[in-house]
Image: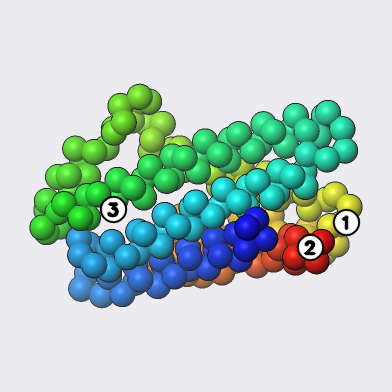
Amino acid sequence: MTRIAFHLAPALMLAYGVVRLVDGRDGQYGPGPAWTVGHLLFLGSLLLYAGVIAGLYARAAGGGPARRITAGSVTAVAAFGLVAFVRVAIVDIIVGLQAADAAEKSMLADRYADVPSVLPQALYDIGPMFFMLGLIALLVQVAFLPPYRRTAAALSPVLAVLGFVVITLDLNLLPAGAALIWLALLPFARESISR
């Protein structure tokens, strides 16, 4: 399952980006079928990124306690961010299913902004960034370990950073950002398949 996740997680993210572009042709995003389908694709992508994180952790943690502790810490950061991202996707799906129009979607989004109210609102807002930072840090750790020390693996963290920057700058570039992240994961997906 982990090796499939290296391909399917970014592929579903790319599909979400395409559906999002279709949804936004009228100048607004959701609510409606495209909003729901897109966010279900995004949720699936995020759940598969758990497999990516687990696969990268398994590679990064070998070779001694220091490496295990570092990999474990970075994995915990990525996992926390992933949980925060999953929460965002679930809230967006619920809001999209309940809202009749854009105004109601906005009102419902405000109502669910701090659900569950276990953590401060600000943490929910920045939480997904931890996923991005954790994933990039794991890629950095793994890229310089044998047998990955080669140009493609060394470029992986750079491609992931570029992918996330592109997405952050403009959500309409989500398909391009997802493609860059997919390229970043390819060296490790291939290694996983050949084992």
Q: Pointer 2: what residue?
A: 191
Task: Tell me what residue is drawn at x 41 percent, y 67 percent.
Answer: 17
Tell me, yes or no, whether the two marked residues, 3 and 1, touch with CB atoms within 8 Å.
no
Q: Disc 2 or 1, which lies upstream in sequence?
A: 1
The quarter holding residue 84 reads top left
Residue 175 picture location, percent across and down = 47, 69
Callout 3: SS: helix
Q: Quadrant of the N terminus?
A: bottom right
Q: How is the image coloured?
A: rainbow
Q: Residue reaching furthest front?
A: 1
Tell me whether circle 2 and circle 1 mark residues in contact (CB < 8 Å).
Answer: yes
Name the residue beneath numbered marker 3.
93
Cα separation between marks 3 and 1: 41 Å
* Residue 39 shows in the view: yes
Q: CA distance from mark 3 to mark 2?
A: 35 Å
User: Foreground mark, 2 or 1?
Assistant: 2
Instruction: Where is residue 148? Give x, y as percent.
Output: 84, 57
Quadrant housing residue 189: bottom right
**Circle nearer the N terminus (3, 1):** 3
For label 2, the SS is helix
Q: Is residue 191 above or below residue 47?
A: below
Q: Nearer the viewer, residue 1 or 158?
A: 1
Secondary structure under badge 1? loop
Residue pictured at 35% horizontal, 71% vertical: 19
Q: Nearer the viewer, residue 116 or 149?
A: 116
Q: Is residue 13 above or below residue 161?
A: below
Q: Amino acid at mark 2?
A: Glu
Q: Residues within 10 Å of mark 1 (few under 14, many from 20)?
A: few
Q: Check residue 147 in the rendering and tell me which mark sits there, or answer none.
A: 1
The amino acid pointed to by label 1 is: Pro
